[in-house]
Each structure stands twice: as C-alpha cells, then as structure tokens.
Image: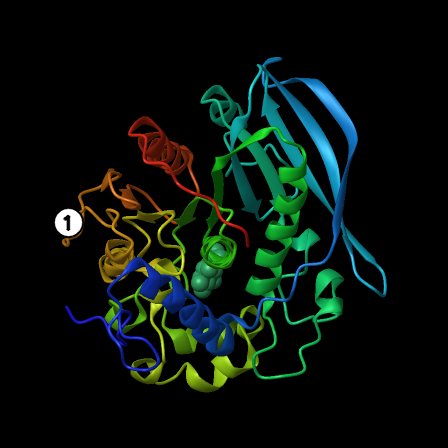
Amino acid sequence: MVFAPDLMRDNSGNIVVSDNDMYRRRKEILEILQKNAYGFMPSKVPVEGRIISKDPKTCSGNAVLYNTEISCIFNSSVFHFPMSLVVPNGSGRKPLIIVINFRPCLYDMYIPVEEIIDNGFALAQIYYNDITSDDGNFEDRLAAFFPRNNDSAPGKITMWAWGVSRALDYLLTLGWFKEETIGLIGHSRLGKTALWCAANDQRITHVCSNDSGCMGAAYARSLHDGGESTSVIASAFPFWFCPRFSEICRGVNALPFDQHFLLAAIAPRCVLVNSASGDAWADPASEQNSCVGADPAWRAYGVKGYAGQLNTYNENEGNFSGRIGYFKRSGIHFLGRKDWQSFMRFINNHINSNDEIIAEGE
Ligand code: GTR
C-alpha cells in the first residue's frame, strides 16, 4: 500500500536517509501535527511536587503508595493536580509506567495494579479530568492558562499530554526510576494522548497506545467499514484538536499528514500499538498499517522498527521484537490485563535483548 503523504521526504523535497536527516525531519513532523491536528504544545513551566500521604501496606505489603500533588508554576498563578504513585519494595531504581486514565481511583478496572507491581514496575496514575475537562470548556483547570485564540491553539489532547510531561518533570526529580525505561500507556482518546505526549517528550522511552483508533494509531486514509473517520471525530470532539483541524478534516486525502507521522515522531524510541479484534470503530487493520508506514523512520536511525507481518494478526498474537510492536487482543474496546501484559512484555523484550533506549531531553 502507498503511504501518503510521504513521511521520508522533507519539506524541501529531499529524501530522508540518515539518522541526522530523520532527527531534523521529526521537528518538521511535529510542526505539521501541531499546526494542523493537535495544536501547539505549550512551553514547560517550573514544576514542584509533594507527597501528601503514604501507605506502605499497598499490594499485599509489597509496594508503597504515595499520594502526590504536582504544581505547575505559571507567572499568574499555580495550577495543581494529583497523581498516585506506587513503587515496589526493594533497592535500586525501578522501571516506571505512567498511565493516564478515565477515572480518579487508582484501583480501576483498567489498571491491574498488583500485577504491574509484581512484574517489578513502578506505576504513576493521573486522572485526565484533573488536568482539564473532556469537553469544550476552555476555562476549565489547565485550559484556563492556554487560551483558544488561534487556529493552532492547543486542544484537550495536547493539554492532557502537557500535564503528563509535567508529572514526569517531578517524577524524575525523585531519582527512583530507571531513565532508560519510562513507559506511558493510555486507552482510546487517552491512547491518542499517550502517542502525542511521547511524540513531543523524548524522555518517554516506551509508549503504548491501546485501541487509540482515529487520530491515534489508525492510518486515516485506509479507513475500513465501521471505523471512525476524521470528519466524524472532528464534529463529535472538536475540542480534542486545534480549531484548524475542524476546517481541514473533511478531505482526508488532502490532510498534510497521516497517523504514521505521529508514530514516526516517536522514533527511534519504542512504541507498541495494541488493538482489539472486536473494536471496529478503532479500525485494527488501519492501526497496523501505521506501524508499517512509520517503519522507515526507525530504519533511518539504523534500528529495527516494525518487524511484524503486513496482514492482520490472529487474536492474541502480535510482534514484540522491533521498536514498533503490534498486538491484537481478543474482545472489545477496553484496557484489560492482556493489554498490560503485552506492554510489559514489549518493554521487557527490549530490556532483555539489551536494546538500550536513550532518553533525550524534551
Ligand atoms: C469514542 C471516540 C473514539 C475514542 C473513544 C474513547 O467515542 O469516537 O475516537 O477515542 O471515544 O475515547 O473511548
């Protein structure tokens, strides 16, 4: 299949061949996506964090739960949001997974906390509404600091992603985590958010989008029957995106990007795309297509990108060997245990094969 527009041709028409070319191309890609889809990523501000309370009897007594508060210090005032942090017992730095979720409670149907801890990971949980509401209210919480006053002003996905990066600012000050294993996972609209956050923030070494679909991992130009289109998503959820996206979303073939651009901005770090066989709305085959379309970005860096098949996988199969992984779970739109197991397996695969991921600054 043809992946258009051409990821590997830069804005001046030159073909991207080397790691240096791709390093520069990533900046162009981010600008294209910021300008036309998600809105510009606001600059960082100073961050402080504090532990409000602590429970050492978490996960059968094998971990400590810290209830924390993150403070983002703007010139005009300070914006606070909570974050739960669970750290397994034992000495040494831990691999970390951040989850941005739909509900405030850590013990949620989408988060098998004890299983994650038993696998040796620390877990940070952020509730997306604590950053800003999932609606067109641009006065709510963080949104009040980022006025929607131009065509490429940040949408809500950008704001949730920005919040995750500020939480990471604080997490890295603790010195408790392995900086070569900083994971991020989100489901559905928060899978889109996780990809966008990792595309912008190079400190995230492993990201997993779960059932992220349209404007997440799914390649829009190959939309299958029953899948969500760019025009449908923009009319139902215009506030997730910048205002300009609503103007240009209808002619999908005229969009100056497709979703392999989003994955490619994560290169050469690791991205896992999880799909579910019963989730036609998120279009699993198109989610897989983006993995194939983004692969040349990793090759330019001289590392293995997508090592999987082109055809759709059977249920509960995938490929975890390259830096782009793909997994298709049986069942419906959900963030379940198998999805988490797939992400932890993907991360462990890189650790065990000494495929060292170099985290860079933002
Ligand atoms: C749907 C939306 C999808 C997906 C999903 C979700 O209504 O159309 O793009 O993000 O919500 O977040 O659960």
Asked whether residue 106 is in view, the answer is yes
Q: How many marks?
A: 1
Residue highlighted by disc 1 = 309
Amino acid identity at mark 1: Gln
Q: How far across and how far down the image is residue 345, in percent?
A: 34, 31
- Identified at 68% across, 42% down, the residue is 170
Residue 352, compared with residue 297, is above or below; it is above
Circle 1 residues within 10 Å: few <14, some 14–19, many ≥20: few
**In this picture, residue 212 sits left or right of residue 74:** left
Q: Determine if the C-beta at disc 1 is less than 8 A from ligand 1.
A: no
Residue 175, compared with residue 49, is above or below; it is above
Q: Quadrant of residue 292?
A: bottom left
Coloring applied to the structure: rainbow
Q: How far across and how far down the image is residue 21, in percent?
A: 32, 66
**In this picture, residue 202 sits left or right of residue 271:** right
Asked whether residue 285 is in view, the answer is no
Viewer-closest of 227 and 129: 129
Q: Quadrant of residue 16?
A: bottom left
**In this picture, residue 261 sits left or right of residue 91:** left
Residue 158, compared with residue 252, is above or below; it is above
Viewer-closest of 245 and 358: 358
Q: How far across and how far down the image is residue 192, in percent?
A: 46, 58
- In the picture, the quarter occupied by the C terminus is bottom right
**In this picture, residue 313 sits left or right of residue 218:** left
- Identified at 56% across, 33% down, the residue is 123
Q: How far across and how far down the image is residue 116, in percent?
A: 48, 27
Viewer-closest of 301 and 205: 301
- In the picture, the quarter occupied by the N terminus is bottom left
- Identified at 47% across, 44% down, the residue is 359
Badge 1 marks a residue whose secondary structure is loop
